[in-house]
Image: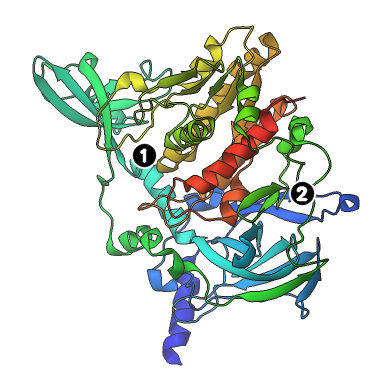
Amino acid sequence: MKKILICAIVCSIVTGLTVHLHLNWNTFNLSRGYFQTRGTTYLTEEVIRYGHVSVISLCANAKKSRVSLNHAHKVYSLGEQIQVQVDLYDLYGNRKLTGGDVLRVWMENPETAASVSCRVSDHNNGSYTALLRAVWSGSATIKAFIASRKEEVVLNYMIYQQHGSLWTVLAEFRANNLTDATACSVRQGNSFKTNEWCNFTNENNGYSWYCKKSKIKQLACDTWSHSFSAKNMSFHLNNTERSILDLPLAALKQDVLQSSVRVSVRGGPKGVKLSAPSTSCNALPAEMTWRRTSPNGFFHQNKWHSLLCTDTLPRTIDAYRQCLKGRTLWLHGDSTSRQFKEVLHSILRFPSHSDRHVPVTDTDLIHNFSISYHAHELPFYHGPRHFKKSVNQAQYIMVDRLPNTTKDIVVLYMYAHFVFVHPDVFRRHVQRLVPSVRNLLARAPNVTIAVRGPHAFFTPMRGVLSYWGHLYSDIWHEEFASLQDKIVYLDFWDLTMAKPSQNIHPKTAIVNEMVHNMMSLLCFRK
């Protein structure tokens, strides 16, 4: 008893983090079956900046935490709101007294391969509320998962502030049979020793990029030729920090709460699902795609069903080919963009010449369309393979080069590589895109532009949290606010929350659903 009391006191002292939350409120049209709910909730940067990291035993523990219904009845009608509460406890079984942990709550029925996720509200006292929607008839189980602990987010931010990035990008210099590699960053490590750094901002299309000069005199800055990256961290962590950073490496099942809730949904024969509004997806006004509707869809028989619009695009080769005829689909970004490209090649049955991060545009000469991939600007973590510096190019460069007569489909995307660096870096890169996109829309009336938002992932690599997707989604919304009536937002957060990926790269089956959802919104757009 004495031990428990001491732990509770220590918990309240060590945590020392007053949680402020970013809230997005959505009011839905009740006449169309929607209900009012609270949207994304996450720690603000102001709080993260001054947060503290407590020992791992005081972090939220899935085995001790609980999920329960807020109402006694367990039978609901199709379309009805289901409210559940999640209470977090630490390893010692003590109730968490502050918020800030990021939870995933979802409802599933494995028999019908059905699942739906929701947004979670944080009450800043260790208690969370999730509002789900009964979207199919039959049985369902509601589960919860600790996606990111507050301590993980705070520690990541501390590293960004102090060291610039989680992992290390290296520049390789080559000349006269000499080679050397040095560490790079979005900032100079020491402003008083600027002569020790190569300033590659111009080479990075105007985005800040610095690499340490080689100690080999013959390898001047202009001999930079390739880039690669390492997963190691070039800074010291104490035992507590290391244990916090390694939390995501635990198996997925370890962070799923052991308690769950079973409910039944009535509304017709087993398997009947909620219908979407009659508006076809390609006629859905662009600004509607930017609204934080949650859930914006659900899985049933492993297919994604939108709740924003009716998918009228057949899942056929001919429909996709007709959509792309005479156009190039630009899928620039990172390896997850390349996943989209590979899935489309599989569906459209024409050969791909992709080579990791090497830029490529593949053309189907018979059916007259192309699909293009180009790695976005640095920061970009290439892995151990050494890539020429020319493989990376800012997306605004591609946008500026498109002719006034273009009728191409441009999908703007940045996310995965920016979870390694301070969010201000992401914000600057998105801001630079805006004037180029605005100019293209003004001069090329037949172009179709979309912004692909962040996706959720679980059990990632060391220190890599999809938590930042919440913040980065807001940055897209804020910076593109004046263009939302002209650009489609591809919101895949709910889709990838409903079926989790244990890696930053979604499974192929999930990418298939993401791609079709994208095509249904962008093809034959009215």
Labels 2 and 1: the sequence-earlier one: 2
In the image: residue 313, left or right of residue 504: right
Residue shown at the point (44%, 47%) measured from the top left? 504
In the image: residue 138, left or right of residue 40: right
Front-lying residue, 391 or 4: 391
**Residue bearing the label numbered 2:** 26
Residue 393: tell me if it is visible: no
Q: Residue furthest right?
A: 31
Q: Residue furthest top?
A: 404
Which label lies toward us, 2 or 1? Answer: 2
In the image: residue 50, left or right of residue 224: right
Identify the amino acid type marked 1: Gly
Position of residue 44 relative to residue 178, above or below, is below
The colour scheme used here is rainbow
**Residue bearing the label numbered 1:** 164
Residue shown at the point (61%, 63%) measured from the top left? 105
